[in-house]
Amino acid sequence: MAEWPEKNRPGFVLFFEDTRPEGFGLGMPEDQSYHDLPEIKALMNGVLNHPGNHLGLIDQFDETLQFYVNGDGSVLIDFIVKGKSGSLQAILSLQECIALVQSSVPSLSALQIPNAEFNKW
């Protein structure tokens, strides 16, 4: 896990891949790096608007929340449930995803994901 700069800081470690040649990261996966909420919102708006792109967040407690853009532009949310070999998943709009992230600091474990269903891997 990446080094956390300061406990309870309002942000997350972020990783993403933008599959467009002209996109963020020039089509290459971005290494994990810490970002605050305004940076995360900007990256979500920039990356999660093209099918096949994905972005993930890791909080200071090593909880992981991932987003994947479907072919129709909707976003699949995938929250890994530790110790249960699965994740909570739901389909939301990009704006709903951004609002969800902004409500989750400092821990992703307190998320209330609308219409989420548990799926075993």
Image: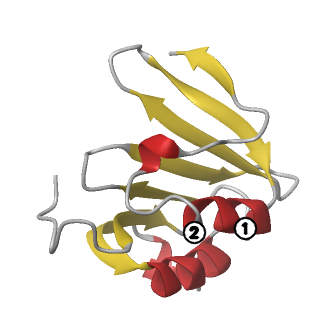
Q: Nearer the viewer, mark 2 or mark 1?
A: 2
Residue located 57% across and 62% down the image: 101
- Measured along the vertical axis of the image, is residue 42 above or below residue 62? below
- Measured along the vertical axis of the image, is residue 94 above or below residue 74? below
Identify the residue position indicated by label 2 in the image. Answer: 102
Q: Is residue 114 left or right of residue 21?
A: right
Q: Amino acid at mark 1?
A: His
Q: Secondary structure at mark 1?
A: loop
Q: Position of residue 89 (x, y in %)?
A: 65, 33
Spatial distance from mark 2 to mark 1, Cα to Cα?
A: 21 Å
Residue located 83% across and 59% down the image: 73
Of the numbered discs 2 and 1, the one sitting upstream in the chain is: 1
Of 15 and 115, nearer the camera is 115
Q: Is residue 15 left or right of residue 61?
A: right
Q: Position of residue 96 (x, y in %)?
A: 76, 61
- Measured along the vertical axis of the image, is residue 82 above or below residue 48? above
Of 88 and 69, nearer the camera is 88
Q: Badge 2 local density, few (<14 within 10 Å), some, or many (20+)?
A: some
Q: Amino acid at mark 2?
A: Gln
Q: Is residue 7 left or right of residue 15?
A: left
2 and 1 marks in contact (CB < 8 Å): no
Q: Badge 1 local density, few (<14 within 10 Å), some, or many (20+)?
A: many
Q: Secondary structure at mark 2?
A: helix
Q: Position of residue 115 (x, y in %)?
A: 79, 33
Q: Is residue 72 left or right of residue 90?
A: right
Residue located 73% across and 37% down the image: 90
Identify the residue position indicated by label 1 in the image. Answer: 50
Residue located 68% across and 66% down the image: 99
Quarter location, residue 48: bottom right
